[in-house]
Amino acid sequence: MSVTIVVGSQWGDEGKGKIVDYLSQGADFVVRFHGGPNAGHTVINNYGTFRMHLVPSGIFNPKTKGVLANGEVIDPQVLLEEIEMLGKAGINLAGKLFISPRCHIIMPYHKVLDKLFDEAKGGRKTATTGRGIGPVHADKVSYYGIRIADLYNPAILSDKLKISVNIKNKILKAFGAEVFSYEEIRKTLNAFARKISPYVKETYGILNTAVENNKNILFEGAHGLFLDNDWGTYPYVTASSTVTGQILAGSGVSPKKITKAVGVAKAYITRVDTGECPVPTEIQGKLGEFIREKGHEYGATTGRPRRIAWFDTNLVKFSGRINDLTELAMTRLDTLGGVPKVKICTGYLYRGKKVDYLSGDAEFLRKVKPIYEEFEGWTEDISSCKKYELLPKNVRKYIERVEKLVGVPVKYVSVGAERDKLIVRS
Ligand code: IMP
């Protein structure tokens, strides 16, 4: 039996989709347990190239079942498009996909309000993905969210939807925005309910029975630790919890069952361009542009350019601790090729004193000065390298310094986008 979890150890976009795709080859179940369509996992495999937002990336393996557990929030349109895309790729989802009736549903008004609220913050905006994530979670914790289970109870759905549309329309009117019609949304939800009904099942039982039966389960984390609502760079974060412990609230499986916790980290950092979020090790100018273009660093969900920064051990070390990581997966080492000198941030200085990530809040991070170690870069094309020992000396030096500083072994080294471009260290 193994319960493996893969989580992001930076600000998302670390390349989790690829690591999940690899690790799920032996999995009986792959599970999404938080986040929603704000996540965008790119998977390249024998079936083609896919951008997955809601369905776990590991679904492509013939024997693997996919679970959308209760912690995930669902946009009906995105889910239906994904189901259709998978059908066209020849993946038969009957008996292979399970959706928790406890999942909250993202309504069209959530998406409009998401944008209106963020714009209203002016220079302090979070620059959300606009997928309705904050507003749907706000409804969830305010006790008037609408869940998948409600779709199959017409009287409850009518009441809840009427109340919600009524409240939201008042807010929309105050913003001078267009209001929503209860009937239109109801029609869309009815059609959605019919289409997904074969997949709706209480997933808590399925997963815990699988644990009891010694099955292999892979929890697919989305986003990254520094987007976590409590532990991230608040308020430049997402609405859900992105830590390993979230599997309990988001799926009903105890984190005590985790046998392997893999933290994914890029060899450099990227942060979707929120503009406002402090990124202490950001690389300005031509070098940042070079890495952005070489690595096609544009958001999978929004297409926005990503800010580029040096690897920051402060952050990944914190991830090791809070996520109780057993292994690291380091991605994008191929992209760093051609950079003459590469740097690793080993700590921060604030008013002449060494401080760490948790010494303050996001505002504090704006004031720190990173301390760097500098390394010779590499120019060799490493994308076809299959063995760790065959990697150029400078690449190995870089990896080994990172694992020493972070205190977690780098087990997986990704040297390209495709599934086989992964070195697994023994
Ligand atoms: P939201 O999750 O759409 O509310 O966006 C909140 C913040 O999290 C924004 O700064 C987004 O750019 C960021 N964010 C959310 N999901 C991801 C992700 O999967 N990768 C990178 N950034 C993300």
Image (spheres, rainbow, N blue to C red):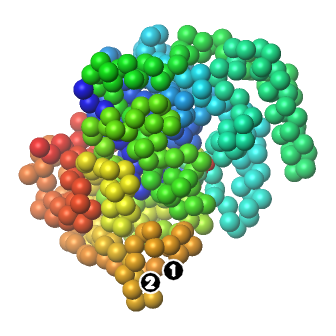
Task: Say which of 398 and 295 sits in front.
Answer: 398
Quarter where residue 158 is shown:
top right
- Tell me which residue sits at (75%, 53%) in the image: 117
Pointer 1 local density, CA inside 10 Å: few below 14, some 14–19, many at least 20: some
Q: Is residue 154 visible?
A: yes
Residue 109 coordinates in the image, percent (x, y): 77, 37
- Tell me which residue sits at (72%, 37%) in the image: 143
Q: What kind of residue is marked 1?
A: Lys
Residue 168 coordinates in the image, percent (x, y): 83, 40
* Image disc number at residue 350: 2
**Residue 150 as seen in the image, left or right of residue 424:** right
Q: What kind of residue is marked 2?
A: Tyr
Task: Say which of 262 and 383 sits in front.
Answer: 262
- Tell me which residue sits at (47%, 10%) in the image: 94
Residue 304 coordinates in the image, percent (x, y): 56, 53
Quarter where residue 139 is shown:
top right
Q: Secondary structure at mark 1?
A: loop
Q: Is residue 283 visible?
A: no
**Residue 179 as seen in the image, left or right of residue 423:** right
Q: Earlier in the sequence, mark 2 or mark 1?
A: 2
Q: What residue would you read off at disc 1?
A: 367
**Residue 59 as seen in the image, left or right of residue 390:** right
Task: Say which of 351 and 186 sits in front.
Answer: 351
- In 3D space, how far apart are the residues under numbered discs 2 and 1 (Cα atoms)? 7 Å
- Tell me which residue sits at (67%, 42%) in the image: 141
Residue 365 coordinates in the image, percent (x, y): 50, 73
376 in relation to 16, above or below: below
Task: Say which of 21 and 186 sits in front.
Answer: 186
Check contact, mark 2 vs mark 1: CB within 8 A.
Answer: yes
72 in relation to 293, above or below: above
